[in-house]
Image: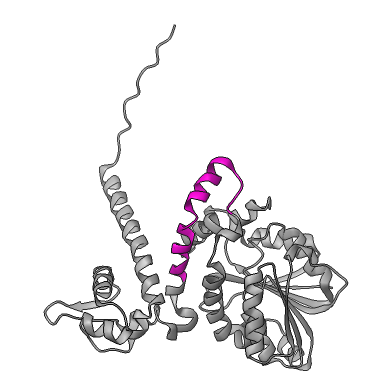
């Protein structure tokens, strides 16, 4: 009969332990400040403060049309979090121009405050995520009640700033073809703003947006109607049901592949729906397919967390593949080749640390 012997606790590096404890404190404060930034964006506080000289809390609240007591407490977090600056003697607060460049609507796609809106949204489904860890499956898309609005606001700013002048010119000769008139589809179009932007810019081309969200398609149709667009239409459609016969000269997806239940079927459908010589422009998360390869990615923790709480889980909820947000360049090339695309080029856009721009052509 043997008796288990207790093992002595492993010696630890106390300095390393203290440093890590400090790191975790920073993580906790950072998580709290993400909510502070989200509220500052949604209430317009950053936009208001960007246009004000150093002002008191009451002056800021008055200009923003907000409750002074809430603004005062918000300023406490924003000040101690080094987001806004404060003169304790004068009792004034201001948003430095250097900070406004990352926090205001005037910054366009450079407005990082829009990204913080994901945290309140994802926090609502944490119980379901924990249960999925324990039992498998996933949290269905329907439980993300405001996802279309959050994602739409984020992507719309990017489309307005870069789609026509930066993204589409990545494909040689594409702008000229769009001006002359071609058939275009955007698969997984969300609220359809990208389609409407292109339809406005290229009236001779014909555009259709597909998305399985009734809410998103409804928003897209309303915008097209408000813009009096006659060359844009929208259809509720599962991306996995796209197929031939070939009807399009250009098909686009914008961060839509990695959260599909059936990404391989989607990509094969895109290939089949393209005319010979047609182009597939796939804008999706630029990452490595391995954890080790993403150690130096500036937003890797954010991307993996969003994947766990949304992109991967909505796929698994449908019994899907669960690619995840960081499916990565290697796996993207593999799936595109499997779909039939023999020629794939990858472009990058200055200032966009999130995405790769895959240009795939059908021979």
Left or right: 206 with respect to 106?
Answer: right
Q: Position of residue 181 (x, y in %)?
A: 79, 90
Say if the magenta span includes residue 135.
yes
The image shows residue 292, relative to residue 61, as above or below, that is above
Q: Position of residue 242 (x, y in %)?
A: 79, 67
The residue furthest top is: 1
Q: Position of residue 322 (x, y in %)?
A: 64, 53
In this rendering, does residue 289 appear at all?
A: no
The residue furthest left is: 89
* Predominant SS along the magenta part: helix
Q: From which residue to which does the magenta span run?
A: 115-139
Identify the residue at horizontal 24%, vertical 73% (top origin): 69
Identify the residue at horizontal 56%, vertical 80% (top origin): 156
Using the image as rendered, state which of residue 268 and residue 320 is in the foreground.
Answer: 320
Q: Position of residue 154 (x, y in %)?
A: 52, 75
Identify the residue at horizontal 50%, vertical 80% (top origin): 109
The image shows residue 321, relative to residue 276, as above or below, that is above
The image shows residue 242, relative to residue 196, as above or below, that is above
């Amino acid at each position: 009969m043997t008796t288990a012997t207790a093992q002595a606790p492993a010696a630890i590096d106390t300095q390393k332990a203290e440093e890590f404890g400090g790191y975790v404190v920073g993580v906790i404060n950072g998580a709290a400040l993400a909510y502070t930034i989200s509220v500052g964006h949604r209430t317009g506080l950053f936009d208001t403060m960007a246009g004000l000289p150093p002002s008191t809390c009451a002056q800021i609240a008055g200009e923003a049309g907000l409750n002074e007591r809430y603004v005062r407490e918000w300023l406490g977090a924003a000040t101690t979090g080094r987001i806004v600056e404060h003169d304790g003697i004068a009792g004034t607060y201001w948003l430095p121009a250097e900070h406004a460049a990352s926090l205001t609507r005037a910054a366009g796609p450079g407005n990082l405050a829009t990204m913080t809106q994901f945290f309140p949204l994802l926090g609502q489904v944490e119980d379901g995520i924990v249960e999925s860890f324990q039992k498998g499956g996933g949290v269905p898309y329907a439980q993300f009640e405001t996802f279309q609005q959050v994602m739409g606001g984020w992507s719309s700013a990017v489309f307005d700033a870069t789609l026509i002048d930066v993204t589409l010119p990545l494909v040689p000769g594409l702008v000229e073809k769009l001006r002359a008139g071609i058939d275009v589809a955007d698969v997984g179009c969300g609220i359809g703003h990208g389609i409407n932007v292109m339809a406005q810019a290229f009236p001779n081309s014909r555009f259709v947006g597909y998305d399985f969200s009734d809410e998103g398609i409804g928003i897209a149709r309303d915008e097209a109607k408000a813009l009096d667009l006659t060359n844009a239409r929208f259809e509720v459609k599962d991306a996995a049901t796209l197929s031939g016969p070939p009807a399009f000269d250009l098909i686009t997806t914008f961060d839509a592949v990695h959260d599909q239940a059936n990404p391989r079927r989607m990509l094969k459908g895109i290939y089949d729906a393209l005319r010979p010589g047609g182009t597939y422009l796939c804008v999706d998360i630029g990452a490595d397919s391995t954890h080790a390869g993403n150690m130096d990615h500036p937003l890797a923790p954010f991307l993996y967390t969003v994947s766990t709480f949304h992109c991967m889980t909505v796929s698994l909820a449908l019994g899907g593949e669960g690619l995840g947000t960081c499916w990565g360049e290697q796996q993207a090339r593999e799936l595109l080749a499997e779909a039939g695309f023999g020629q794939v080029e990858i472009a990058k856009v200055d200032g966009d640390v999130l995405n790769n721009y895959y240009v795939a052509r059908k021979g």
